[in-house]
C-alpha cells in the first residue's frame, strides 16, 4: 500500500484547489507565483509538474467530507449512531419528534461541497491539459481519462445521497442544471465511455503517479476501474446487461481477493488527512467506555446477523459498558478500521461480486446464487439454501450488501432504490425515517 505524502509544492496546489468551495463563485489573483500558484497560472501553459500536482489535488479532495457523508447516511439507515457533542447526529438525522432535515446543516452542505471540490479540481485538470503544449496527445488523453472517470465516480456518490446531481460544472459562470437521477446517470455513463476512449489512447503508462491505486496505475489497469464504475452506473440505471458486460472488463473476479480495488489512503504527515471514520476502541472501565466520540453499531445489525457471520466480529466489538445518549443505546462499537491511517475502499472486488449477483437476478438466478455464496463463504457462512425466485434473491442480496458494505455509504441508497426504507426500525416514539439528503440551500435552483 502506498503511503500518501504531499511535498511542499503539492500542498500549495491542494490549498488553492480546496478554496473551490462547492462550485459556486470563486476568484483568484491574476498573477502567477511559482511558490503559490494561481489558477490562471495553471489553466494556461501548465507544465507536467503542475498537471501532476493537480492530479494529487484531485485525489486529496476526493476524501473531503467522506466521513460526514458515510456516518450521516449510516445514521439515517439505522446502521449506526454517532454519539458526540453535536445533538443533530441523534436528533435531525433520526427525525426526532418529526423534525426535518435542514438544507443548511452539515449533513447537507459538507458532502455536496466535498464531492464538488474534487469534481471542480478534475475539471481544472482537463482544462489545463488541453491548454498546454508541454505534453503529447497520448499524455493529454491520460489526464483526461483519469479526470473523467473520477468525476463520474464522484457524481455517483452524490446521486446515492441526494438523488440528483449537477453534472455540468466546468464553467463557474454558467453552471448546468441539477439533473434528476435518470438524466444524471445517463450523462455519467456517457462520461465514462469518453473516459475509456481517452484511456485507450493514452499509451502504456501515465505521466503521473497515483496514491491508493496500486494495480490500477497504468491506463489499461485504470480502465478496469472505469469499467467497474460504469457497471455500477448501469446497474443503478436498470441496465443489467450493460452492467454485466462492463464487469467483464473490470477488476471483478469471482475467485479473486475480495479486497482488491482502488482505495482512499491516509497518513499523519503534515498537510495530509487521517481516516475520518476511524474511532479508537473504548477503555476497559465504564468511565473510559463513554469517553470521546464514538460510532455505535445499531443493535439491529448485531441481532439480525446470521450466527457465525465473521463480518460482525471483524467490524464491531462489544463495548465495556453499553452506551446511551439521547434515549438511544448500543452494545457494540465500530472496529471497521484498524487505525487512524487505515485505507477506505473506493470500489473493491467484494462490492463488484455483489453487483454481479444483483445484475444476474432475473437473468440467471443460479449464477446469482453462485456469486452470493462467494460472499457468504468468505464471511464464514454456509451456502444459501433459500428460495431462488427473484424476490427471495433480492432479499438475500440486500442482506449480504448490508453486512459486507456496512458503514460505507450504501445502505440508505440500497433501501431507497428498492422502496424498502419503511422497513427500517424506529428507534424512539416520534422518530421519522429519512432516506435522502436535501440539496444545500445555496444550490437550490
Image: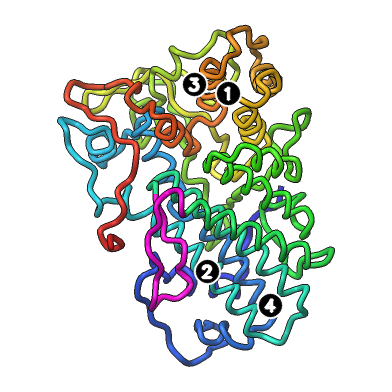
The quarter of the picture where the C terminus appears is bottom left
Q: From the viewer's perspective, is residue 25 above or below residue 147?
A: below
Which one is earlier in the sequence, the residue at label 4 or at label 2?
4
Numbered circle sitting on residue 314: 1
- Estimate the spatial distance between the alpha carbons at disc 4 and disc 2, rounded to whole Å: 16 Å
According to the image, label 2 marks what residue? 121
Image quadrant assignment for residue 324: top left
Judge whether residue 106 can be spotted in this image. yes
Name the residue at 49% across, 54% down.
155
**Mark 4 vs 1, N-terminal side:** 4
Q: CA distance from mark 3 to mark 4?
A: 46 Å
Does the magenta-highlighted stretch encompass residue 402? Answer: no
Q: Residue furthest bottom?
A: 31
Query: Between tags 4 and 2, which lies in front?
Result: 2
Q: Is residue 343 shown to the viewer in this render? A: no
The residue identified by callout 3 is 317
Residue 49: mark in rendering: 4
Give the total number of marks visible in the rendering. 4
Rendered location of residue 261, percent (x, y): 68, 43
First in sequence, mark 3 or 4: give its number.
Answer: 4
What secondary structure is marked by label 1? helix
Query: What residue is rendered at 74% in x and 62% in y?
Result: 199
Q: Is residue 45 above or below residue 253?
A: below
- The alpha-carbon separation of the residues under discs 1 and 2 comes to 36 Å
For this view, does 61 lie left or right of residue 148? Answer: left
Name the residue nearer the viewer: 145 or 239.
239
The Cα–Cα distance between marks 3 and 2, rounded to whole angstroms, is 39 Å
* Badge 2: residue crowd in 10 Å (few <14, some 14–19, many ≥20): many
In the rendered structure, the answer to whether residue 379 lies left or right of residue 325 reads right
Amino acid at each position: 500500500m502506498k503511503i500518501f505524502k504531499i511535498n511542499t509544492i503539492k500542498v500549495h496546489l491542494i490549498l488553492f484547489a480546496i478554496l473551490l468551495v462547492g462550485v459556486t463563485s470563486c476568484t483568484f489573483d491574476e498573477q502567477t507565483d511559482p511558490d503559490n500558484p494561481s489558477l490562471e497560472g495553471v489553466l494556461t501553459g501548465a507544465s507536467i509538474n503542475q498537471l501532476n500536482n493537480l492530479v494529487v489535488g484531485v485525489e486529496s479532495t476526493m476524501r473531503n467530507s467522506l466521513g460526514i457523508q458515510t456516518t450521516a447516511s449510516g445514521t439515517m439507515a439505522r446502521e449506526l449512531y454517532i454519539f458526540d457533542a453535536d445533538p443533530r447526529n441523534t436528533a435531525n438525522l433520526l427525525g426526532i419528534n418529526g423534525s426535518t432535515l435542514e438544507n443548511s446543516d452539515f449533513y447537507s452542505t459538507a458532502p455536496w461541497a466535498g464531492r464538488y471540490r474534487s469534481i471542480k479540481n478534475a475539471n481544472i485538470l482537463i482544462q489545463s491539459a488541453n491548454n498546454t503544449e508541454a505534453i503529447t496527445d497520448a499524455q493529454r488523453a491520460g489526464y483526461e481519462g483519469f479526470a473523467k472517470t473520477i468525476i463520474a465516480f464522484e457524481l455517483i456518490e452524490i446521486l446515492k445521497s441526494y438523488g440528483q446531481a449537477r453534472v455540468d460544472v466546468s464553467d463557474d459562470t454558467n453552471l448546468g442544471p441539477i439533473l434528476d437521477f435518470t438524466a444524471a446517470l445517463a450523462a455519467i455513463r456517457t462520461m465514462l465511455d469518453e473516459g475509456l476512449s481517452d484511456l485507450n489512447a493514452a499509451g502504456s503508462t501515465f505521466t503521473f503517479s497515483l496514491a491508493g491505486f496500486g494495480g490500477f496505475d497504468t491506463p489499461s489497469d485504470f480502465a478496469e476501474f472505469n469499467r467497474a464504475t460504469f457497471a455500477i452506473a448501469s446497474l443503478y440505471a436498470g441496465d443489467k446487461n450493460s452492467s454485466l458486460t462492463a464487469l467483464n472488463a473490470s477488476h471483478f473476479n469471482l475467485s479473486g481477493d475480495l479486497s482488491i480495488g482502488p482505495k482512499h489512503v491516509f497518513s499523519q504527515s503534515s498537510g495530509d488527512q487521517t481516516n475520518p471514520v476511524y474511532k479508537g476502541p473504548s477503555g476497559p472501565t465504564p468511565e473510559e467506555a463513554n469517553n470521546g466520540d464514538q460510532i455505535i453499531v445499531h443493535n439491529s445489525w448485531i441481532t439480525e446477523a446470521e450466527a457465525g457471520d465473521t463480518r460482525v466480529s471483524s467490524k464491531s466489538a462489544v463495548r465495556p459498558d453499553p452506551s446511551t445518549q439521547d434515549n438511544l443505546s448500543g452494545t457494540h462499537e465500530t472496529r471497521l478500521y484498524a487505525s487512524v491511517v487505515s485505507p477506505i475502499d473506493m470500489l473493491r472486488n467484494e462490492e463488484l461480486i455483489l453487483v454481479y449477483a444483483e445484475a444476474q437476478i432475473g437473468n440467471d438466478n443460479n449464477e446469482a446464487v453462485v456469486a452470493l455464496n462467494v460472499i457468504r463463504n468468505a464471511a464464514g457462512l454456509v451456502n444459501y439454501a433459500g428460495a431462488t425466485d427473484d424476490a427471495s434473491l433480492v432479499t438475500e442480496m440486500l442482506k449480504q450488501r448490508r453486512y459486507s458494505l456496512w458503514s460505507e455509504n450504501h445502505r440508505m441508497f440500497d433501501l431507497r432504490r428498492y422502496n424498502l426504507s419503511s422497513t427500517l426500525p424506529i428507534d424512539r416514539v416520534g422518530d421519522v425515517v429519512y432516506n435522502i439528503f436535501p440539496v444545500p440551500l445555496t444550490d437550490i435552483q
